Amino acid sequence: MMHSDDRARLNQLMARLIGGDDNALFELHAEFGDWMAAKMRAHVRALNAPRPDPDELHGLVLDGWFALRECASGWESDGGALPWNWAHHRLRQVAAAWVGQYADELDEA
């Protein structure tokens, strides 16, 4: 659960992002990147794909932030949902594009 001080900071950064301040995107990544990383790992896991290595995960998280920036104007701080939960479907699309057409190998038998 997010503490109220963290939530206030998140709301402040999201307001700046919505206002067009791209520096807020990098501050979001620095301060809340672990939250986004957890969400993106969950999306990859839900797609039954192998866990991304740290470098791949870093890129996936950055892609997630950029996708969130594209739809951020629809997010409302008083709506209750954290931005990465609110943008669930958008972030799932990012993860799906990263995974691509994944398939387990068939057993010889």
Image: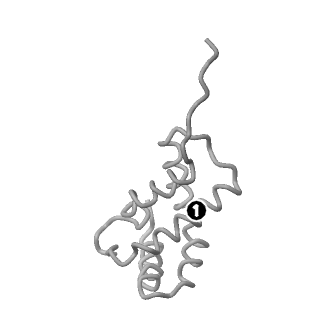
Q: At label 1, which amino acid type do we have?
A: Val
Please name the residue shown 50% across and 87% down the image. Answer: 21
Left or right: 104, with 39 as reference point? right
Question: Label 1: how many residues lie within 10 Å, few (<14), some (14-19) or many (20+)?
Answer: many
Residue appearing at x 46%, y 87% in the figure? 20
Judged from this view, the residue extending furthest toward the left is 79
Q: Nearer the viewer, residue 73 or 6?
A: 73
Give the vertical position of 82 relative to 72 (above or below).
Answer: above
Task: Give the image's coloring scheme.
Answer: one colour
State the quadrant of the C terminus. Answer: top right
- Residue 17 location, x and y as percent? 46, 82
Which of the 4 quarters of the picture holds residue 62?
A: bottom right
Viewer-proximal residue among 44 and 107:
107
Q: Residue at x 54, y 78 (%)?
A: 25
Residue 24: % across, % down: 53, 82
Q: Nearer the viewer, residue 23 or 35?
A: 23
Q: Is residue 63 above or below residue 95?
A: below
x, y (%) of residue 86?
Answer: 36, 63
Could you tell me residue 19's position as x and y percent? 42, 88
Quadrant placement of the N terminus: bottom left
On screen, residue 14 above or below 83: below
9 versus 53 height, above or below: below
Quarter of the image where one finds residue 59: bottom right
Task: Tell whether 33 sits left or right of 80.
Answer: right
Secondary-structure class at tag 1: helix
Marks counted in the figure total 1
Kindly identify which residue carries mark 1.
61
